[in-house]
Amino acid sequence: MSVFQPYEIIVGRSDSSASNILIIADHASNCVPPGIDLGIAPDELDKHIAIDIGVASVTRALCATLGCGAVLAGVSRLVIDFNREEDSPGLIPTVSDGVVIPGNSDADAEARLVAYYRPYHAAVTRTLDAIDRPFILSLHSFTPQLATRPEEQRPWDVGILYNTDDRAARLAIPMVGQAGLRVGDQLPYAGTVLNATMNLHAEARGLPYLGVEMRQDLVGDDAGARRMAEALAPVLLHCSNRLA
């Protein structure tokens, strides 16, 4: 019987000038592992509450173009959210953007930490440890409209997030704007509030990183994902060359 693996690793090309870049995609999958019943309609798994739409496609396009590596989540954020601290109230959501997740009301948090969360973060650590002078891209996507806040405007094409380390952000923001994209600095929300994975793997270790949020309707198909990858690739290389 095979063991469920809660992550996928793309190995960077050793002959690439971008082999030190690692993309980390916490919400790249909508997979619900065997034995877990969230109690929601199947079509909810295709929505932003379950997966960061477009992230896996943009990650693969960047890896193919640059030769960099990646660690992609293999579990839906509705099962356990890899971009939360272990003691965060949102680690295993019972409600997401107005959708009740009844299967999580009595979830065994420790069992999911052991099975999915800790192996994922251990894989990120091992991968980073094997890279000389790593530079991290934390890649996410956001919905253009929340069901629970329909009045909220989210006009940005890309958001740049960070906590205390804004070195890459300061380099990236003008470049993203010059690429013709509307860029939000700490928008649609701030990395000072939500930055758990980068706090753990980048800021705590002093590693340079860039946090990017892409608008989901721009990367929801293959053509859009390729366009976004083309726009982000030079930004990523520039930040890595300057900071790693």
Image (spheres, rainbow, N blue to C red):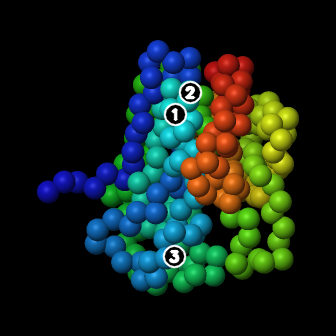
Residue position marked by numbered label 2 in the rendering: 66
Quadrant in the picture for residue 3: bottom left
Badge 3 or badge 1: first in the primary sequence: 3
- Identify which residue, 64 or 156, lies in the foreground: 64
Classify mark 3: helix, strand or loop. helix
Residue position marked by numbered label 3 in the rendering: 44
Quadrant in the picture for residue 238: top right
22 shown above or below 48: above
Asked whether the beta carbons under mark 3 and mark 2 sit within 8 Å of each other, the answer is: no
Mark on residue 63? Answer: 1
Question: What residue is drawn where x is 67% and y is 43%?
Answer: 228
Asked whether the beta carbons under mark 1 and mark 2 sit within 8 Å of each other, the answer is: yes
Work out how far the residue at label 3 is from the one at label 2, CA to CA, in angstroms.
33 Å
- In the drawing, does residue 243 fall left or right of residue 15? right
Badge 3 or badge 2: first in the primary sequence: 3
> Which amino acid, by three-letter code, is at mark 3?
Glu
- Identify which residue, 102 or 238, lies in the foreground: 238
Question: What residue is drawn where x is 60% and y is 28%?
Answer: 135
Report x, y in % for residue 95.
57, 79
> Which amino acid, by three-letter code, is at mark 1?
Cys
Asked whether the beta carbons under mark 3 and mark 1 sit within 8 Å of each other, the answer is: no
> Which amino acid, by three-letter code, is at mark 2?
Leu
Q: Is residue 242 visible?
A: yes
Report x, y in % for residue 54.
58, 54
Give the farthest residue toward the left: 1
Q: Is residue 140 visible?
A: no
Report x, y in % for residue 176.
79, 38
Quadrant in the picture for residue 88: bottom right
Classify mark 1: helix, strand or loop. helix
- In the drawing, does residue 181 fall left or right of residue 128? right
Mark on residue 134? Answer: none
Give the farthest residue toward the front: 223
